Amino acid sequence: TISNGDLLELEVDILIPAGLENVITEKNASNIKAKIDAELANGPTTPKADDVLYKNGVHVIPDLLCNAGGVAVSYFEMVQNFYMDYWDEKEVHHRLDKKMTVAYHSVLNTSRKYNINMRQAAYVIAVERVVEAMKLRGWV
């Protein structure tokens, strides 16, 4: 038997916290041995733990990016309904792969450009998009 805490600290290539919030904390972050942390759960990593993982070279794909596929597919459904169109499963997967790949690389490039972690980079992109929308509306 293995505890949930021990499970997070196994020597693995990819860690996928997919259940609870705040399971990776400042207390256990330095024990994470995974090279990649793909956050499928909402908020599995505390802010201080995020800093520890970044400093230790763990590549974190933050929840707001990693689990966005469901929202993207909901958008695809809305588009299909609006245009009274139908995409088969292959087309949905193709479009989802394209959207998620572009989003991932955008976050990665922003992370590298500003020398910040992936979560911070995702927030930078989000704020930039809000600013752009405000400019287009003439609000700023």
Image (tube, helix red, strand yellow):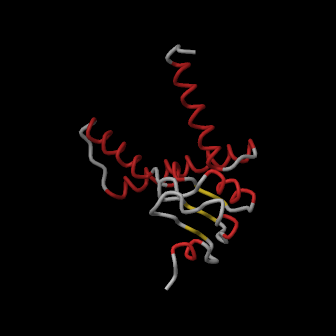
Give the answer, above or below, for where 29 lies relative to 117.
below
Quarter where residue 33 is shown: bottom right
- Please tell me which residue lies in front, 41 or 61: 41
| Circle count | 0
Say whether residue 42 is left or right of residue 27: left
**Can you say which quadrant of the picture contains the C terminus?**
top right
Say whether residue 28 is left or right of residue 89: right
Give the answer, above or below, for where 73 lies relative to 40.
above
Give the answer, above or below, for where 71 lies relative to 130.
below
In x, y percent, where is residue 28?
64, 66
Tell me which residue sits at (29%, 42%) in the image: 80
In x, y percent, where is residue 107?
62, 46
- Please tell me which residue lies in front, 82 or 23: 23
Quarter where residue 122 is shown: top right
Quarter where residue 130 is shown: top right
Tell me which residue sits at (47%, 58%) in the image: 41
Say whether residue 1 is left or right of residue 45: left
Q: Residue furthest bottom?
A: 1
In x, y percent, where is residue 74?
34, 46
Q: Residue furthest left?
A: 84
Q: Residue furthest front?
A: 27
In x, y percent, where is residue 90?
36, 58
Tell me which residue sits at (56%, 36%) in the image: 126
